[in-house]
Amino acid sequence: MFDYILTYSKIKFYPLEPVKEDIKIEDIAHSLSLMTRANGHCSHFYSVAQHSVNCCQEAKSRGYSERVQLGCLLHDASESYISDLTRPVKRNLPEYFAIEEKLQSVIYDRFGLDNLCQEELKQIEEVDDALLHYEFEELMDFKLLDAPPKLVTEHDFSQRDFGSVKKEFLAKFNAITRKKTSIKCVGIDGCKGGWVVVTLTDTSFEINMIKNIGEVFNAHNDYDSVIVDMPIGLPESTTDVRPDGAVRSLLKGKASSIFNTPCRQAVYANSYDEANEINKRILGKGLSKQSYAICGKIKEIDKFVSDFPEYKNHLVESHPELCFAMLNSGEPIYDNKHTYQGARKRIELLSRYYDKTEEIISYANNSPKLMNCLDDVIDALCMAVTGMIAHDNLLKTIPENPMMDKQGILMQMVYAERM
């Protein structure tokens, strides 16, 4: 019999004598995304990769180092080559422990974690054990511990397509390990026929018009931030609190620019009359024609996040008038953005923060596709500049502690504080 296994990428891998160079992150991600936790004794399929992604996110939310985050993502990576055994069996097979420890050590070494200290290993173990408790509770209706450990963030224990989990696993790996020389921030604003997308880096910019929101992530999967001027996180009852009212109170004199967000049920209605009646019934108030006019784009984003949950709460909402005010010492720009004076004031403000602003405006004015939607370009640029200012996970939110909607999406608007 062969002494090797054939991996997904067609590597002949020797589990008992592992070669560091033969370890591929694509093989680990693919295998773990198809491998179930708890030997399959769950209420639905829940993969080792999904557990690992949740552990990585928990470590990040706790403020642990990127080394610990990566360790949490890879702590079960040996299972992709030797599978796993239930704990009672494993305890009686000391040789398995030796094989597992040797292989896991080589995997950590492969990805720069060969010298994890005891404190780092303890943090990884604590996160792993905390997730285990809540996985038993959510997936098996069983309390593992009398005193539940604390989780800093909410996690997705739902049944997910293995391909989306694999993609998220690789995205988290790449986000932690890539050596970046530039920041990449994306701002998006809706326009007639699609979306205006402005992408900024330290040294360059790019402006595109796209038809659907998914194209952004096809082109920009290494982003630092993606901010869109469109409601994300939708109410489904009067107990769901959106940030709209709080933002209006900050934008005195410009409060009318913040439309009421329709409930999710109204967004999926087939006509204005139907949406209006649904909104009255569920939220107790009618739906303006202005709010209904953007329901198609709200629905597009809501469906996208539902279909690709790895982008949930990574694609985030803001409003340009909020961002302009926050960049202007809290003072809104009162001039109408559709007037020359209003546009110039916004452009001059953005120029203080991004030195290629005038170059972007000139490019848009000379582009047949963009010259008729300059206000959308300015708004998308504002979203991207906001991301640039707050690139180090320093985006502020309104409210400070936002609620999640029924789909686990934060109901918030983000902004950057003036430098």
Image (spheres, rainbow, N blue to C red):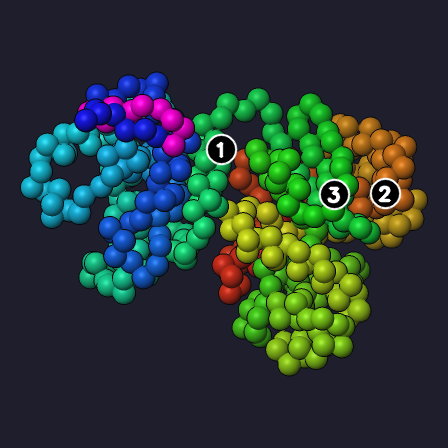
Q: Residue at x 32, y 61 (%)?
A: 43
N-terminal-most mark, 3 or 1: 1
Residue wearing tag 3 = 210
For mark 3, does the 10 Å Cα neighbourhood hold few (<14), some (14 to 19), or many (20 or more) residues? some
Do the numbered discs 3 and 1 sit on residues whose CB atoms are within 8 Å? no
Residue wearing tag 1 = 175
Q: Which numbered tag is attached to residue 36?
A: none
Q: Which residues are magenta?
A: 8-16
On the image, the x and y values in percent for residue 379 come to: 77, 45
Query: Looking at numbered disc 1 in the image, what kind of residue is underneath it?
Result: Ala
Query: Looking at numbered disc 2 in the image, what kind of residue is underneath it?
Result: Leu
Query: Looking at numbered disc 3 in the image, what kind of residue is underneath it?
Result: Ile
Q: Residue furthest left?
A: 92
Mark 3 vs mark 2: in front: 3
Depth check, front residue: 145 or 392:
145
Residue wearing tag 2 = 374
For mark 1, does the 10 Å Cα neighbourhood hold few (<14), some (14 to 19), or many (20 or more) residues? some
Q: Is residue 311 left or right of residue 23?
A: right
Name the element at disc 3: strand
Query: Is residue 13 rendered magenta in the image?
Result: yes
